[in-house]
Amino acid sequence: MARQCWDIAGCGRGPGGAKVGALGPCPAAKAQAADGVNGGRNAGRACWAAVGTFGGGKVCEPYRDHKSCLSCPVLKQVRAEEGDGFRLLPPGQRYVAPPRTGTG
């Protein structure tokens, strides 16, 4: 089985991870709607599609800052490993840009 995001990132928040007791499981480990995407367990190979996952030591908000997801080393690795079979989002999930704020 392909490595999951929690293994690639070494965050310790995947199933049975060392930090699950203190910090709880990562939302990607529980996101059943993405199970099987890119050969992953839950959102283990589509973590960028699960709200509240962590990257770079902070909570990622894919619907606010999709650029950080696209530059993520986990996404880049999964994309390279999957090749033409890569899926950015689980079936039925669509990216919706956040509303613009301010008058700019």
Image (tube, helix red, strand yellow):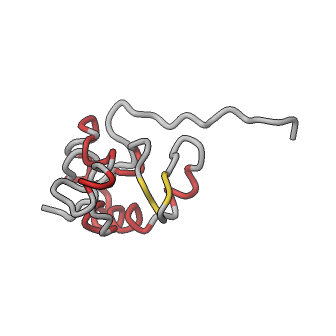
> Which of the 4 quarters of the picture holds residue 33?
top left
- The residue furthest right is 103
Q: How many marks?
A: 0
> Which of the 4 quarters of the picture holds residue 19?
bottom left
* Residue at image location 48% in from the left, 52% down from the top: 59
Q: Where is residue 64 in the image (x, y as percent from the top left)?
A: 59, 43
- The residue furthest front is 22
Q: Position of residue 89 (x, y in %)?
A: 38, 43
Query: Is 61 positioned to the left or the right of 100 in the image?
Result: left
Q: In which quarter of the image is the N terminus?
A: bottom left
> Which of the 4 quarters of the picture holds residue 5?
bottom left
- The residue furthest left is 1
Q: Where is residue 47 in the image (x, y as percent from the top left)?
A: 36, 51
* Residue at image location 18% in from the left, 63% down from the top: 2
Q: Where is residue 34 in the image (x, y as percent from the top left)?
A: 28, 41
Q: In which quarter of the image is the C terminus?
A: top right
